[in-house]
Amino acid sequence: MAVAQTNMDETTERLKSLAMPQGGWSTAGREDALSRLITMGLPQRRDEYWKYTRPDTLVQDTVIEVSVLETDEEAVFKTVDSLKIVFVDGVFDANASDDLSLEGVTIERLSEAGSDIHWAQGLYGALETGGQTPVQRPLAALNTAFATDGVLIHVTGKPSKPINMIYTHVAKTSDAILHHVVKVDADAQVTVLENGPAAARFNKCIEVDIADGAKFHHVRTQGRDHERRAVTHMFARLGEESTFKSFTLTANGVLTRNECVIELTGDNAHATVAGAALGDGDFHHDDTVFITHDAVNCESRQVFKKVLRNGATGVFQGKILVKAGAQKTDGYQISQALLLDGDSQFLAKPELEIYADDVACSHGSTSGAIDEDALFYLRSRGVPQGEATDMLTLSFLAEAVEEIEDAGLAEEINERLAAWLARRRS
Amino acid sequence: MLNIKNLHVSLEEEDKQILKGVDLTVEAGKVHAIMGPNGSGKSTLSYVLSGKGGYVVADGSADMEGVDLLDMEPEERAAAGLFLAFQYPVEIPGVGNMTFLRTAVNSQRKARGEDEMSATEFLKVVRERAKSLKIDADMLKRPVNVGFSGGEKKRNEILQMAMLEPKMCILDETDSGLDVDAMKLVAEGVNALRSEGRGFLVITHYQRLLDHIKPDYVHIMANGRIVKTGGPELALEVEQNGYADILAEVA
């Protein structure tokens, strides 16, 4: 596809302000990504894939100044026993981070990975490249080319605790680009947690390669700074009988686009991607998911719930592609919005594309208000209207939260959801 | 306990009068039953008393122990001691039955300025009361009414009633969808709550529930009014002859 000259010029112009980290094994991958990016051009307003979300502020070279939320609320997952890796506005904070050693896993920083042959070399940018067809994701290519840092995680066993990436945000115009690579060996398993508002503008990419029989669990919360912007990509490739489960809680944020691209390449694999988003006022949240079934008897689930009020906007673009031969596919996709007032909106584009003849795929998308009958039922038992509304809102979100495997983490997410709602009641 | 005077109620959405002057007094310690054909306004009466939206009170009054009910929010009526056992209990996925019960009990206590029930005390009381209704630990843990059978839902309503200890209980067709055994169990639960200080209004289509919950008075409701009042024998008359004779008699 030819890129219009103007877009190419704009892209070239934009890239002038970015510096590609030099040296080391990642250079080849970065240069490839840059040429992909120049060929594709940066996303534009009229691109079909950006129909519901304006890319300008994610693309432009100046970062819009934001305020940093002052809060005495404890960071999410603080009480979880984990290996903590802290980035402040995208810059690694050695003092705040734990020692990067844990049995069953090797952890290195992208910026320190050196020039020797490295296990991540064949992966860095590889899953991202695979995810560029049939839909282009230029901001992911930009990330691969220009990421200043990130974490390379090679899971060889079953580490005793989760790895927690914490993204602290203190600067008003920070522009952070991080790229992580996770390789989970056969039968190994790991839980990765991410939390924090990260930066005024955050571009994050994570590539996850899950070998046969391996398990990858991921729970993320995107901090509740109101004015932050983020575009994130998660690319995952699943081997035989492997498991991928990812859940994201997004509270606030003027613009968030989370793309998740999953390829089920081994038979009997399972992938779940779920999300709960809470938006109040100037909030735009976009979940864009693309799941490709390219093996037999795989299951995938997409469960997205959004609570929107005061003119907030939610977007869902989700696709299940079942390739010829991917028989016995079980695909499920649900996206629902609870609109707490008439000003908020939910834009959904659910898609199925199926080339196999023995599959079960179901999908549904709804938007609606609080169920008046249920509300009356709770109030008739003495629960005040505000609390009753919150209970029903949490009940609406429950289907997404239940996708989190670990009960303790699910409980913590539920508490955060309840606190967010309660703050809006007082 | 409950005094309803000349109550006139229409639907909010359309100009349709449902209740056309209901007069009824339920004394503390007594069980009143309301029977009547479909569409006579029985369920509307229960909804209006408990504060459901969508109705307009055009005339008349309803008070409980001298307090105007119609002026209060549903949760205020509940805290004041009114309870409605629903004909169709609502399913609430994602909210545990126990959490729901405890929130309800403590919300009412808070509204009345009483101390909240501690988790231990609550657990003890709920287990004991659930046991007599044959509600097991699993039903208490599951989301409110989700996947419950018809009988389980109704037993769950009675458990809520037992936990909330209301002064005035309205049972809206609690017998609908119940087999004989389930009805017995529910009736036993209700009977266990009968006391000097508590009034009951039992709405039903059929006499058989009243075999188990023996009423002091039976009212026949038709076309938005109470058209006849009598003792338990009135229910038997309905069972044998249907409503037609009675309605013809009062017409």
Image: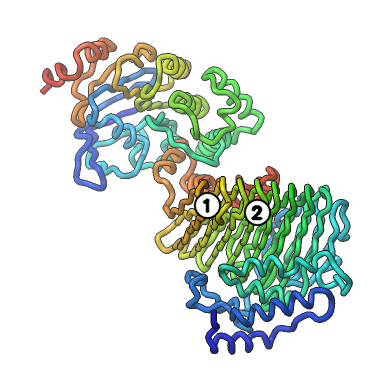
Is residue B195 in view? no
The answer for which chain carries disc 1 is A
Q: What distance separates the C-alpha of mark 2 from that of mark 1?
A: 26 Å
Relative height, residue A108 to residue A62 (above, below):
above
The answer for which chain carries disc 2 is A
Q: Residues within 10 Å of mark 2 (few under 14, many from 20)?
A: many
Numbered label tally: 2
Task: Indicate which disc residue A356 carries.
Answer: 1
Is residue A199 in view? yes
Pinpoint residue B217: horizontal percent, then vertical percent.
29, 16
Instruction: State the image quarter where residue B101 is shown.
Output: top right
Q: Name the foreground residue: A355 vs B232.
A: A355
Instruction: State the image quarter where residue B59 is shown.
Output: top left
Q: Residues within 10 Å of mark 1 (few under 14, many from 20)?
A: some
Pinpoint residue B37: horizontal percent, then vertical percent.
23, 25
Q: Split into 4 quadrants, where in the image is the C terminus of chain A?
A: bottom right
Residue A262 in the figure: left or right of residue A125: left
Q: Are marks 2 and 1 on the same chain?
A: yes
- SS for callout 1: loop
* Residue at the image point whose x is 60% and y is 26% from the top: B137
Pinpoint residue A221: horizontal percent, then vertical percent.
66, 58
Residue ID for mark 2: A246
